[in-house]
Image: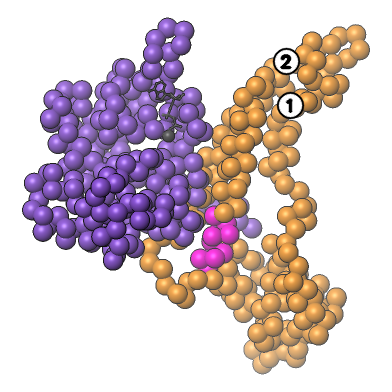
Amino acid sequence: MSIRHGLLALLERGPMYGYQLRAAFEESTGGAWPLNIGQVYTTLNRLDRDGLVRALAESEAGQRPYEITDGGRAELTLWFATPIDRADRPRDELAIKLALALTTPGVDVRAVVQTQRTASMRMLQEYTRLKGGEQRPADLPWRLVLDAMVFRAEAEIRWLDHCEASLVRHTPIPSQARPATADEPASHDDSRDESGVRR
Amino acid sequence: MNPVLELRGVTRTHGTGETAVHALRDVSLAVAPGELVAVMGPSGSGKSTLLNLAGGLDRPTAGEVCVEGASLGGLSKRQLARLRRRSVGYVFQALNLLPSLTAMENIALPLELDGSGPRASRRAAAEALDEVGLDGLGGRFPDELSGGQQQRVAIARALVGERRLVLADEPTGALDSQTGEAVLRLLRTRVDAGAAGVLVTHEARHAAWADRVLFLRDGVLVDTAGPLARPEDLLESAQ
Ligand SMILES: Nc1ncnc2c1ncn2[C@@H]1O[C@H](COP(=O)(O)OP(=O)(O)O)[C@@H](O)[C@H]1O
Ligand SMILES: [Mg+2]
């Protein structure tokens, strides 16, 4: 989640100080992405350094509001105009975990998949519960945020189903298996290459 | 609370010997009033078999199925038919609407068969049509309705009256996501009012409306997702 762009979008409404930004951010995402105040100030400092926001004079109460600059506005426009690239995420921990599980001796990949699916399903149930109840028009932005999480969790579960189906013919590597060496092959299974990865 | 539906060690095998298909193996499950249970699993995993057994449309090879405390195996054909009409609402994967009856008549039929007067049955049917967003279309025949509309008629038929057990086999199959969600809300509302429900679906998004989600693999229940224990897990993982 881009806190940076989130804060810029909020400042486009008018100058705000840190605590206001945090409250507004959480409100506009229905509390789904809680921020700590430290994250807010760190992000504001970086935005200031990059010339995207500017600090205004401190109020009598000692609060320092920030306002968006023209540069910040341009950045925000670009953000809204650019589709989110899922590949931009630094890494997909789950995919990496499953890939490692496949090639790590003694790991029951199916159990890993099942555990994850159960957890994802629970999360999906929880989102759905939050979505339930009455549907007030004022809740629409928050419902759309929830729907995004619902569809994402669903995609993950579908991917896990797919992984499980692909695993049907996979024989787990026993826990005592060691990497193959030249004089002592660990396996005669020719469907596995030298690195131990299934083809 | 006594379960509305209970399966005890239920096995269903088709055929014998080498060619036997184990559609369901030693499945135990109890669904309480006010509880909605979703069943997920790949095609051929035994979902429809489980539902057919629960609704008394099929008999187990081994084990016992009880609805409202009555073991289905011990009921006469007549008693079973009565229980199915009165207590069980069923949304079939193939909708099974009667083509020669209007939408309204399709919905009112089980009530009339069960002894309600035609007036009361029609009033209840009209309410059910309204609930699924089809008010005004009661006079149409199934072939005059779209696939999604037919599906909603089938759902109204399953929900009408005082059904204690609602069984739905892929009830959102032909529906767009908005209508599908509306159907799940209906089912949820009915269950919250005290019915027990079993929902078969391959869509996790729809299964998530249930209190418990069961996963079937090759006729075996493999795992269950219940309610989230700690809400803070949700917040952490959403960041
Ligand atoms: N009448 C039948 N005769 C033989 N096999 C059947 C019969 N009905 C179902 N099966 C088999 O039982 C298994 C489970 O079927 P079903 O419950 O319809 O699965 P699902 O609804 O999950 O797709 C499948 O392998 C199917 O081919
Ligand atoms: Mg089926």
Whichever of callouts 2 and 1 sits on the residue coming sooner in the sequence is: 1
Q: Residue at x 42, y 7 (%)?
A: B17
Is residue B151 at all visible to an observer of this figure?
Answer: yes
Q: Name the colour assigned to chain A in the rendering.
A: orange
| Residue drawn where x is 79% and y is 20% of the image | A192
Q: Which residue is mark 2?
A: A176
Question: Considering the image in quadrants, where does the C terminus of chain B appear?
Answer: bottom right
Counting from the top left corner in percent of width and height, residue A91 is at 76, 48
Q: Position of residue B160 (x, y in %)?
A: 23, 52
Identify the residue position indicated by label 1 in the image. A104
Name the one closer to the observer, B52 or A104: B52
Q: Residues within 10 Å of mark 2 (few under 14, many from 20)?
A: few
> Image quadrant of residue A88?
bottom right
The chain drawn in purple is B
x 18%, y 40%: residue = B85
Q: Main secondary structure of the magenta part?
A: helix
Q: Amino acid at mark 1?
A: Thr
Amino acid of disc 2: Gln
